[in-house]
């Protein structure tokens, strides 16, 4: 299906890919979802709608995908969605609730964007089969986040 950019940023990425594909040079395109990092921060407002489909990917898994895309011959001249996988597919309020529980922030105070963000659920099957990057589960990420929050408070 044809891609339609929802803003100038997305439109520029679509056009850049067209130029790359037409160039004849070898490529691997990674379309990376929202990257999460286990660190303490105030996420309000969330950059997605309350009921928007979201699928994040852990920073370490992105690093693995980047490396594997450079060394795996099977990745050449392919386009991959890089996201966490089925276990990471949630609605915005579900993600926010889990995240805020770790931060010990009340979910009732969560603020969501009034406009959809650049998030959805993605087909990552081919990329995972070749790049083997989805190594972090949401539970593992939230454990890492809890450790980061604890370390933050210990520094104070």
Image: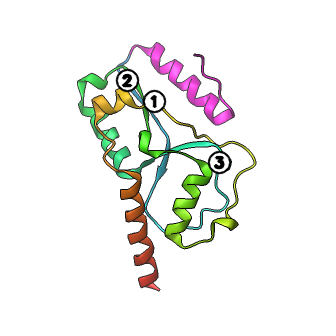
Could you tell me which secondary element the residue under label 3 belongs to?
loop
Q: Mark 1 and mark 2: span between their CA atoms?
A: 20 Å
Q: Residues within 10 Å of mark 1 (few under 14, many from 20)?
A: few
Queried whether the magenta region covers residue 2, the answer comes back as yes
Question: Residue 74, which numbered label?
Answer: none
**Label 1 or label 3, whichever comes before in sequence order:** 3
**Range drawn in magenta:** 1-24
Q: Which image quarter holds the N terminus?
A: top right
Q: How crowded is mark 2: few (under 14 residues within 10 Å), some or many (20 or more)?
A: some
Give the label, 1 or 2, closer to the camera. Answer: 1
Q: Which residue is drawn at 67% across and 59% down?
A: 45
**Label 3 or label 2, whichever comes before in sequence order:** 2
Question: Residue 123, which numbered label?
Answer: 1
Classified by dominant secondary structure, the portion drawn in magenta counts as helix
Q: Which residue is drawn at 68% across and 33% down?
A: 8
Question: Residue 48, which numbered label?
Answer: 3
Pinpoint residue 74: horizontal percent, then vertical percent: 26, 23
Vertical position of residue 44 compared to residue 74: above or below: below
Pinpoint residue 120: horizontal percent, then vertical percent: 57, 37
Pinpoint residue 9: horizontal percent, then vertical percent: 63, 36
- For disc 2, the marked residue is 27
Q: Residue at x 57, y 60 (%)?
A: 97
Vertical position of residue 83 compared to residue 79: above or below: below
Which image quarter: residue 62?
A: top left
Queried whether the magenta region covers residue 14, the answer comes back as yes
Asked if marks 1 and 3 touch (Cβ < 8 Å), the reply is no
Q: Mark 1 and mark 3: span between their CA atoms?
A: 20 Å
Vertical position of residue 95 compared to residue 21: above or below: below
**Label 1 or label 2, whichever comes before in sequence order:** 2
């Amino acid at each position: 299906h044809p891609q339609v950019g929802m803003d100038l940023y997305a439109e520029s990425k679509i056009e850049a890919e067209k130029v790359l594909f037409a160039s004849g040079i070898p490529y691997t395109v990674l379309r990376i979802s929202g990257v999460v990092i286990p660190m303490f921060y105030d996420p309000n407002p969330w950059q997605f709608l309350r009921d928007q489909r979201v699928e994040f990917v852990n920073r370490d898994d992105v690093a693995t995908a980047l490396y594997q895309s450079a060394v795996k011959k099977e990745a050449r001249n392919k386009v991959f969605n890089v996201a966490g996988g089925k276990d990471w597919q949630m609605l915005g309020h579900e993600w926010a609730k889990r995240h805020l529980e770790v931060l010990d922030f009340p979910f009732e105070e969560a603020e969501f964007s009034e406009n959809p963000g650049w998030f959805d659920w993605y087909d990552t099957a081919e990329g995972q089969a070749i790049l083997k990057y989805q190594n972090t589960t949401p539970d593992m990420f939230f454990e890492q986040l809890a450790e980061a929050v604890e370390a933050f408070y210990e520094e104070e």
